[in-house]
Amino acid sequence: MVDRLAATRFLAVLGSSGTGKSSVVRTGLLDSLELGLMAKAGSSWYIADFRPGSDPLRSLAGALLAGEQHITASDRDSLRGFLARGPRAVIEWCRDGNLPAGTNLLLLADQFEELFRYQDYAKREETQALVELLLESAHSTEFPIFVTITMRSEYLGACAFLDGLAETISRGMVLIPRLTRDQCRMAIVGPADVCGIKTDQPLVNQLLNDLASFAAWDDSGGSDELDKQARRADQLPLLQYTLNRMWLRARERRGAGADGRPLVLRLADYEAIGGLRGALNEHANQLLKELEDKAPESVVEAVFRGLISGTTVAEAVRRPRPLDELVKLAGGTEQAVRAVIDTFRQAGVNFLAPELDPADPKPLDDDTFVDISHESLIRQWSKLSEWLEKEARAAQLWRRLKERMADGDLLQGRELAALVAWKEEMKPNAEWAKRYGGDFDSAMHFLDESQRAEQDRIEAAKRAEEERLAAKERAEHERRRRRITAAVAVVVALALFLGGFSIFFVIQNHKLADALQQAELAKKEAQEAEAQAKKALEAEKTAEEEAAKAKREAQQMAQQKIADVAKGLGPRPTATYADESKSFGVAAPAAPVQALNGPTPTDLPGGKVLTTAQLWEAIAHHTLGSAIFLIDVGNATHSQTIPGASSLPTAGQGKVDNKTMQDIWNALSKLTGGNFDIPVVFFGADVKDWSGYNGGLRAINMGYSKVYWYRGGIAAWKAADQPLK
């Protein structure tokens, strides 16, 4: 690295996530420079260390001012404006006397890939401005300015869109490979020996074995490439975190009176903190519990959901945000938000950045960017993984709401109920909606208007039913009145025939009869009302029992089908098949796709994608539950399918009319017994068949909570030597 930087003055340290790019630069390159290993430059260096974030020029300004005392936000803003003047701004800054004579300037842009997260023209312009500034600074002959960047290797292609960057990187590139088992052993034992810390050999062996179990050292044994890469990316961060927790535990155990005794890291310490897989999750949950009196879990959830982006755990990335935006996301509870951030960035934790300095625990400025320290937290903290899935589901429903708003037809029925329930549970606000295109007020007005229209429709139907019943009752009353009148007329005629004296008694008898009739009528009406109420309760109870029975029968049918399929399964798949994990670079659309034949995305918004090995495990070992429904939504032209699968090709089509959509709804409800929590797995012909994606998307929009897409479809199942029927 030192030689490459000396030769080109622009060093690009590349590697996949979790290979230790930042660490090797800070512990290797920076120490080497300050030791004078770049002979021509000497050992005097001013290092401006920064991460681009969402305001790269301001981040660089803060790094250039880091060596000065009492720097304010105004100072950073002023220098940011100066740097925005042009590519030679850093050179001019040095010319103004800010770089002492005989001192070299190193501009260290860590996690350079953050530059490529721009979402609009203004951010792209600022990205271009920073790149031009770095390139021009590295070419300066007037001052000894050097540039180093660390970047994930998968972003190398994006550099080609910025003039001159790709060519410069190719001349000064150093690739950081993944550590081998022996190198990991050295990384565990070597630094500990330097610091006088002893590590028990059983502990070292257990750590290495667990690292291999977590992600194999070679390329064998993995079936899901995306999952394998994510696990590899987590190896070093988890190892670092686990060793640090063990060191803190051992130091606490030894106590202040060490008497010169060395710290010893033991296997018992490792097991006590939960091991490689459990240490981080257990610690994060402990911090969450400690926050109960300072901030409700809803605030913690709002903060962390605001700091991540992605639809699945494997592809999730960090999303840095300024503090004031996080406060708005959490509903304006600034004190609670600050408590959450400070708890998760305190010394010994460092789940969030910037790290809290115990010696100078000053509060963050409102415009300070907060970030997750490493994406491994997203994958290894189960609570955060759940929140990510909730965020993806919420985004899916939000996009659905905006699509319906664009159509102009008010929501109704179950679709409206699902969106209203989402609104009440999630309590979205305008700040949250910004990341998905904004227009919050209009969307909420549309939803409220749909609610009012639905309520008016329900009340109108209720009034119509009440009027129908009242009219029926009036007609019945009129018929009874006519019968009584006719009877009275007969009595009166008879009374006139019998004589005037008898009339008095007849009239009195008539009044008595009328009173008895009214009493009998009231009694009868009360009995009828009671009977109707009882009948309604019985009908409701019967409906509930029938619904429960339908769910039980559907579940039993699914269990039996899966059990029958499991008996005929082929050997356990150990790889991926028929390109089922291959990425074609296709984004996941929010609506069903009309053209069914073509490359598909690798994710399903609001649902999950299964590989052949995962589907095999679900059938053989019930990893998704004992009852799952396999649904073939292909175009019905293939002659074979997966045993036990139900055929529903209309669900896999592109745009369909309302009648067909209702038919799909009815078919799924009949198949699942109306159980919206039972797992449903959609599949088509292969990875270039969109029907499985379309079917899964429709089920998600209908309210099914456990939707899966077997992307490889029949082609992958067949390639894995699994049975077809």
Image (tube, rainbow, N blue to C red):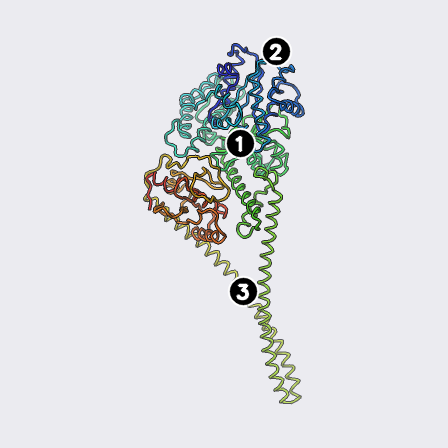
User: Would you place residue 167 above or below residue 230 in this image?
Assistant: above
Pinpoint residue 153: horizontal percent, then vertical percent: 47, 26
Going from N to C along the chain, the mark reached first, 3 or 1, is 1
Specify whether 668 is left or right of 104: left
Of discs 3 and 1, which sits in the foreground? Answer: 1
User: How crowded is the residue under tag 3: few (<14 C-alpha within 10 Å), some, or many (20+)?
Assistant: few
Question: Image point 65% across, 86% down: which residue?
Answer: 503
The amino acid on which the numbered mark 1 sits, given as a three-letter code, is Arg
Residue 268 in the image: x percent, y percent? 44, 27
SS of the residue under disc 1: strand
**Foreground residue among 457 and 529:** 457
Disc on the earlier residue, 1 or 2: 2
Please provide percent x and percent y for residue 86. 61, 22
Q: Amino acid at mark 2?
A: Ala
Residue on which the image places disc 1: 318
- Point out residue 604 in the picture as x, y percentages from the top left corner: 47, 40
What number is the disc on residue 101?
Answer: 2
Q: Residue furthest front?
A: 163
Few, some or many residues within 10 Å of mark 1 (<14, 14–19, 20+): many
Which residue corresponds to mark 3? 532
